[in-house]
Image (cartoon, helix red, strand yellow):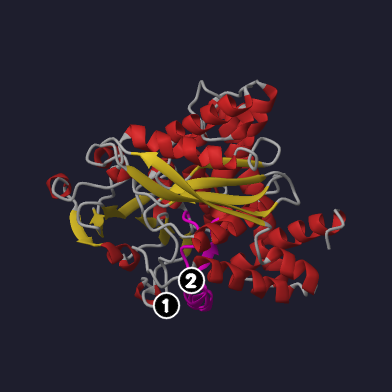
Amino acid sequence: MADKSFNAFTMAQAQFDKTADQIALDEGTRELLRNPMREYSFTIPVRMDDGHIEVFRGFRVQHNDARGPGKGGIRFHPMETIDTVRALSMWMTWKCAVVDIPLGGSKGGVICDPHNLSAIEQEKICRGWIRQLAHDVGPLRDVPAPDVMTSAQHMLWMLDEYEVIYGAKYPGLITGKPVGMGGSLGRTEATGYGVIYTLREALKELDLKPSNCVASVQGFGNVAQYAIRLYNHLGGKVIAVACWDQNDQTSYTFKKKDGVDIDELLKITDRFGGIDKTKAPGLGYEVLPGEAWIEQDVEILIPAAMENQITAENVNKMSSKVKVIAEGANGPTTPEADAVISEKGIFIIPDFLANAGGVTCSYFEQVQCNMNYFWEKDEVLQKLDLKMTSAFKAVSELARKRKLYMRDAAYVIAINRVAQACKDRGWV
């Protein structure tokens, strides 16, 4: 699903440069915001279960903290690169700003494949990552969270190592923790639900009903699963889901014209979101090539996997019926494809708005940890809905007022907020 020649940071900078030109950003602020403020690259030596030493490469990039402590996930991925982490940290800055939470943007990662690591080996990587960064992350400086192929358990190992180092309790160090150990109710659902909250508002603007709109989804991890579940609850139907097959090292699309059954699929799904292609046909699913998700005759596309998925090569394979693209993934659409989408008049909910539910609920978790008082799930989700809906309406209103593409409007709001914070602090 990934193109090795693709550079996410180049794309992130191009998106920023476009908006910087639109708002006539001064050169000093432009130079400050188009590059990360701090970067950490380090090795993590681990004694593997068979006794040999394996050395893993880890990263943490802190893009900008003018609006508050850094915030961003930690990925475990065999194809992780420093440029991907740089891009993701920049997108996190805009994401926190567009939903107006008092946090900056960071991102981290380790080049590894959890599929091939035991739980003990993964724990050693987590603790090694924290040991390298114990003085550079923290509740008041930079707050990590789970991301691709990391979980609540990984976060808890990291928190424990940090607390061992400092000899005190710091539940606000990290978010995405297990409920009962400082985690927030609703955090698991937050990103996927946030995508659908914004999609619901977009459909209202377009005078469309979920019951009259069919969707196709790329990805079947946590984000996609909860997005599908909530969209079904609103009366909508998803007919196709694409996901990565670890055994074949390729992707497949699973299609069911009557609509996918989320609970049915979960029974044949591994913990990384891979659907068993040998069992799916027996449940009435057609197994198609991975790219087929974008070619379906649907009104809604939800890319919720990885970056660089809607490109110049496949954007014109979309059905003429497509009315909305809700970007559940980070950076799924390249600038070249974006131009085509804009020209076609398709309503896009940009990634750093659509998938901001996760970081918003992470912020709620931080607040609850700092108070040592935790909200009920309904309260968390109500606050999340309010925050996402408010952010969507602000972007949509600016887009209509200034006749801007939705992504451009979201960038204008986010970059202006961060630039103003830098100016207010006297940095530029």
Element under disc 1: loop
| Disc 2 secondary structure class | loop
Q: What residue span does the magenta drawing correspond to?
A: 328-351
Q: Is residue 348 magenta?
A: yes
Dot 1 or dot 2, earlier in sequence: 1
Identify the image quadrant of residue 295. bottom left
Which image quadrant: the C terminus? Answer: bottom right
In the displayed structure, 129 sits above or below 426; it is above
The relative height of residue 342 versus residue 48 in the rendered view (above or below) is below
Residue 322 higher or lower than 47, as above or below: below
Residue 337, given in percent of the width and then of the height, sits at: 47, 75
Residue where numbered disc 1 is placed: 312
Say which residue appears at 71% left-offset and 37% top-offset: 140
Which residue does the image show at 50% across and 46% down from the upper left? Answer: 74
Q: Do the residues labelled 1 and 2 touch (CB within 8 Å)?
A: yes
Q: Which of 408 and 28 is in front in this view?
A: 28
Q: Can residue 101 be seen in this view?
A: yes
Q: Can residue 25 be seen in this view?
A: no
- Across and down, in percent, residue 37 comes to 69, 57
Above or below: residue 318 compared with residue 385: below
Q: Would residue 183 be found to the left or right of residue 400 on screen?
A: left
Amino acid type, label 2 = Thr
Instruction: Using residue 123 as the reference point, say whether residue 17 is left or right of it.
Output: right
Residue carrying label 2: 334
Find the residue positioned furthest to the front.
52
Circle 2 Cα neighbour tier, 10 Å, few/some/many (<14 / 14–19 / ≥20) = many
